[in-house]
Image (cartoon, coloured by chain):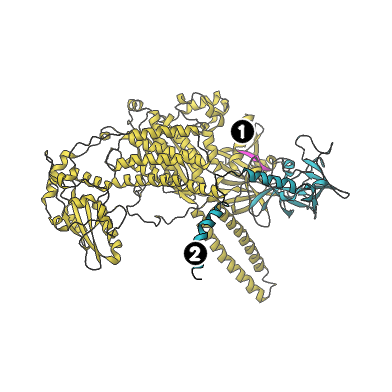
Chain colours: A yellow, B cyan
């Protein structure tokens, strides 16, 4: 990669991270719809937009920078309370996120399409148009607060807004004075903040004018408490903090003379900035004599309480339910915005690594495993020669064996560590899907509760990436066709709001993902009719199929092109593609549905693709590897067990069911060998089963699969190659493709 | 004269910077005349293109000598045991693991009409490869590819005057991979477009 390409990749990676964080935060905001937005959260979102703007400007990505700039403006107005957060604004912010992603995707390809430019322009215009004017004639509640003008003057606009908000809502305000020693005031202050956080809001932190001794420094924290004075005091036990109440005068019609005393609030502390003891950029220092503050007046809280009723701001959207709610069932709480402390140190201990590098490391581990296998063979050979060997060489052999075992353990640990390094939480995809659900539901006029759980389950990065499209397809189908309109649902005696849930769960070496809805379900009889009409199955086949098999017809390639899918309670839009994608990940997809009650799709995926356990089979003197995760069982058969049905070879398995067979030698055009006994590897993906006839079984082994690469992509039935040591290259079977092939063969003959 | 250097620098520094300034390239200045100058020297300095010979890798296929520009060749390896790929294109002899990558190995004899059918060199029924056989690894647009040759003979330096790029009856025709002939003394090399041969 050249320098410019590297820079671009760096930009895309970093921006994607920011956009992801932004998405998460907006999602939390979305969940809190109808409530007063958490100021910390809003602040976090504002900062994310701000970072994105800076980054995009740095890399000359004007489109992204422009949108970030306008979004930041809007967010700034939101956090300063100049604009209230309603559904329209939230939708617009979420739409911005989509546009960010679109532009990022294009930026990665070094393009910027005119349609994207149009979309950007239009969105920017709307962002700017929102709530441009706000009536501000009322009395400033801040004037009612007994706070010296000097102190007020050093508040930032944001701090002032938060303070005003607290006064308006009648929150008890406190000045908390905490002296610390200069040597460790930062840890002390951090600890104090941690203690205060659950009790209310730290509006501002100001260095106090009263130094705490020769080597000390004191801070005044303006604090809006949610708890009583006693509790606050109790919680601050053991810290050097003292608390003083800030008096709030009752709101009166006549304006207080305060206005004439207090100078108009300025953003910065002016002359006071000279003082060197500033702790952070947003904090200005105060010079006031604290004496007047020390009027601890208990009644101020009582007054505040009585005031609050008249001035509580009720947001309009609490009256009607939002069209979509996203509910998280994960155990850890909703992600919070970045902390308020700003520091040049990065917030996380993570490094970003190109997945290609991990792949290269994984290949190296694969080669090490081969060397280890060779060492083991040597040790084994030495052991077997013990009768003829001298004592010295015997001891040598034993030592070799011991060291090899050590090596094996360390290699296992290395391999495990590498696999873990590739793991990312599946929630990365879930968050994106939650936004999609919002959009589709709005377009379709459906009301949906989208329930997410298990987002913390981890999967290989490559699998997570490949998963988003299939999941998007399934969820889109669920909303488009599965979920009924609110009116229909009410008429059918269901709740007005539909539930669509997305759940992940780890089961051993596999991850199970379920997408379910409580919509109309799939009518299997209509599916059957459609499949017959399209010639996908014959009458005879249709008669033999059970409900589950009928439902699974929706995954057939021809089925999806059906015109009137929506009359068929809906599925079928590209589900064959979904199935293919899942199959490419060595996964299995299954569907279950009950008419009128809903549909659920079950996906089973391996945790990683990098190293798989494989069954080695011999066919006409050649060796092939079959991924063990698709092998259900292995049968030993004699030629007499194999029957023919309609010129197709099948096997009767324990009198329970008939298994279609494919002879690998014949399929691959190898010379067939007439051995008395065969082995049948029963492979299964989803509902399909196939018996693969091979000559011999050679054992199991962990293998690193390499794709066949560009020139060989078109080879059917082979997914890759692996090296077994001894310079032996072995091909890995693509079980999904073989099943597909056998299936289409089946249908052609039928 | 302790003050002399100071005086000198006082006098010369502005003058020097102005002087230097004329040497520095400014993005907005017109350099058309420079380009013309350079173009002129280029044309006069290389009046005899034959003087720059190119290196070719010469190898044998069915007794004939072929050559390809050596800059296209990544490496030459001895023939390892190849694994046949069922149902692949007929010119694919097999695959082999080469340092963590799967290398497909191709036959080009059929394409050159030297044989009717690619020889069986992979799988359990294949005979041991001849000792002299080699695989030439080249980089193609979609990954590495190996080409089976019967033997590698030498690296030859051919000057443009030693090439015949327009030989009626030998060169030409669509999709033909023979691009010309190279002649060194009495030795004749058939020049191949290796990528065309793999197509």
- Residue A637: horizontal and vertical position, in percent? 64, 45
Residue A582 in picture, x, y percent from top left: 52, 40
Tell me the SS state at disc 1.
helix
From the top left corner, tell me how far across and down residue A271 is, in percent.
Answer: 25, 54
Viewer-proximal residue, B75 or A740?
Answer: B75
Q: Is residue A385 left or right of residue A431?
A: right
- Secondary element at tag 2: helix
The residue identified by callout 1 is A744
Asked if residue A663 lies in the magenta stretch, the reply is yes
Q: Is residue A246 above or below residue A523?
A: below
The answer to whether one can see residue A652 in this image is no
Q: Which residue is mark 2?
A: B7
- Badge 2 and badge 1 both on one subunit: no
Q: Dot 2, crowdedness within 10 Å: few (<14), some or many (≥20)?
A: few
Answer left or right for A563 relative to A721.
left
Q: Is residue A420 magenta?
A: no
Asked if the residues shown at circle 2 and circle 1 are in contact, with their CB atoms under 8 angstroms apart, the answer is no
What residue is drawn where x is 47% and y is 39%? Answer: A103
Asked where in the image residue A384 lies, by quadrant, the reply is bottom right
**Quarter of the view holding residue A539:** top right
Q: Label 2 marks which chain's residue?
A: B
Residue in front for this viewpoint, A706 or A557:
A706
- Look at 49% across and 64% down and name the residue there: B7
Visible residue check, residue A57: yes
Judged left or right of residue A72, residue B121 is right
Q: Position of residue B166 (x, y in %)?
A: 81, 39
**Residue sticking out furthest to the right:** B186
What span is in magenta? A660-664
């Amino acid at each position: 990669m050249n320098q410019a390409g590297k820079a671009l990749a760096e930009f895309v990676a970093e921006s994607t991270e920011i956009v992801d964080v932004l998405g998460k935060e907006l999602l939390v905001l979305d969940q809190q719809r109808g409530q007063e937005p958490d100021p910390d959260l809003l602040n976090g979102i504002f900062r994310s937009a701000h970072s994105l703007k800076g980054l995009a400007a740095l890399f000359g990505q004007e489109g992204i920078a422009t949108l970030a700039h306008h979004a930041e403006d809007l967010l700034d107005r939101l956090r300063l309370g100049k604009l209230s957060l309603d559904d329209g604004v939230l939708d617009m912010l979420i739409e911005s996120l989509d546009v960010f992603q679109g532009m990022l995707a294009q930026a990665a390809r070094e393009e910027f399409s005119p349609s994207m430019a149009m979309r950007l322009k239009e969105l920017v215009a709307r962002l700017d148009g929102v709530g441009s004017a706000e009536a501000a004639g009322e009395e400033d509640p801040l004037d009612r607060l007994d706070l010296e003008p000097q102190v007020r003057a050093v508040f930032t606009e944001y701090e002032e807004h938060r303070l005003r908000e607290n006064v308006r809502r009648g929150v008890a305000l406190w000045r908390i004075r905490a002296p610390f020693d200069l040597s460790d005031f930062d840890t002390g202050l951090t600890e104090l903040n941690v203690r205060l956080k659950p009790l209310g809001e730290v509006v501002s932190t100001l260095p106090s004018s009263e130094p705490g001794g020769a080597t000390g420094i004191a801070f005044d924290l303006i604090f809006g408490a949610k708890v009583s004075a006693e509790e606050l005091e109790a919680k601050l036990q053991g810290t050097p903090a003292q608390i003083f109440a800030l008096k709030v005068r009752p709101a009166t019609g006549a304006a207080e003379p305060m206005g004439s005393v207090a100078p108009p609030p300025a953003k910065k502390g002016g002359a006071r900035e000279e003082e060197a003891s500033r702790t952070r950029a947003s904090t200005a220092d105060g010079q006031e004599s604290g004496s007047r503050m020390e009027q601890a007046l208990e009644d101020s809280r009582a007054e505040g309480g009585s005031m609050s009723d008249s001035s509580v701001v009720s947001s309009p959207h609490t009256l009607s339910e939002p069209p979509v709610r996203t509910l998280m069932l994960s155990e850890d709480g909703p992600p919070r915005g970045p902390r308020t402390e700003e520091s040049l140190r990065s917030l996380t201990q993570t490094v970003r690594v190109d997945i290609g590098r991990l792949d290269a490391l994984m290949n190296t581990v694969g080669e090490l495993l081969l060397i280890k296998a060779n060492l083991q063979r040597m040790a084994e050979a030495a052991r077997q020669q013990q009768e003829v060997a001298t004592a010295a060489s015997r001891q040598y052999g034993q030592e070799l064996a011991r060291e090899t075992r050590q090596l094996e353990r360390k290699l296992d640990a290395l391999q495990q560590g590498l696999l873990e390094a590739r793991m990312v939480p599946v929630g990365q995809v879930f968050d994106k899907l939650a936004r999609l659900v919002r959009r589709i539901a709005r377009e379709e006029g459906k009301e949906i509760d989208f329930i997410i759980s298990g987002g913390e389950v981890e999967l290989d990065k490559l699998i997570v990436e490949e998963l988003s499209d299939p999941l998007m397809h399934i969820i889109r189908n669920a909303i488009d066709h599965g979920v009924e309109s609110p009116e229909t649902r009410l008429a059918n005696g269901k709740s007005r709001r539909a539930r669509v849930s997305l759940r992940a769960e780890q089961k051993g070496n596999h991850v199970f993902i379920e997408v379910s809805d409580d919509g109309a379900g799939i009518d299997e009889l209509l599916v059957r009719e459609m499949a017959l009409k399209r010639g996908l199955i014959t009458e005879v086949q249709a008669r033999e199929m059970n409900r589950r098999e009928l439902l699974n017809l929706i995954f057939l390639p021809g089925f999806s092109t059906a015109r009137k899918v929506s009359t068929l309670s809906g599925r079928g839009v590209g589900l064959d593609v979904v199935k293919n994608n899942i199959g490419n990940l060595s996964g299995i997809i299954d569907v279950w549905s009950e008419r009128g009650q809903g549909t659920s799709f079950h996906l089973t995926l391996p945790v990683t693709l990098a190293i798989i356990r494989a069954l080695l089979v011999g066919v006409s003197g050649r060796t092939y590897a079959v991924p063990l995760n698709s092998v259900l069982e292995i049968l030993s058969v004699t030629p007499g067990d194999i029957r023919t049905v309609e010129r197709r070879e099948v096997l009767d398995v324990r009198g329970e069911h008939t298994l279609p067979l494919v002879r690998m030698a014949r399929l691959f055009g190898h010379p067939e060998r007439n051995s008395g006994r065969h082995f049948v590897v029963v492979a299964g993906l989803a509902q399909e089963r196939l018996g693969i006839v091979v000559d011999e079984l050679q054992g199991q082994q962990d293998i690193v699969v390499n794709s066949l690469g560009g020139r060989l992509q078109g080879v059917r039935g082979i997914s890759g190659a692996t090296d077994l040591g001894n310079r032996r290259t072995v091909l890995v079977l693509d079980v999904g493709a073989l099943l597909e092939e056998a299936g289409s063969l089946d249908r052609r003959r039928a | 004269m302790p003050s002399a250097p100071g005086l000198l620098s006082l006098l010369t520094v502005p003058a020097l910077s102005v002087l230097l300034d004329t040497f520095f390239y400014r993005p907005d200045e017109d350099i058309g005349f420079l380009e013309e100058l350079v173009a002129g020297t280029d044309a006069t300095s290389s009046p005899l293109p034959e003087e720059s010979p190119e290196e070719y890798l010469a190898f044998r296929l069915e007794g004939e000598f072929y050559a390809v520009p050596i800059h296209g060749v990544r490496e030459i390896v001895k023939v390892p045991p190849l694994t046949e790929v069922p149902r692949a294109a007929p010119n694919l002899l097999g695959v082999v693991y080469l340092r963590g990558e799967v290398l497909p190995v191709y036959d080009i004899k059929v394409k050159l009409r030297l044989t009717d059918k690619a020889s069986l060199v992979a799988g359990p029924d294949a005979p041991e490869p001849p000792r002299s056989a080699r695989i030439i690894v080249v980089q193609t647009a979609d990954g590495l590819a190996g080409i089976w040759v019967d033997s590698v003979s030498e690296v030859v330096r051919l000057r443009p005057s030693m090439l015949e790029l327009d030989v009626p009856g030998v060169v030409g025709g669509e999709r033909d991979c023979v691009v010309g002939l190279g002649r060194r003394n009495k030795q004749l090399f058939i020049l191949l477009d290796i990528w065309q041969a793999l197509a």
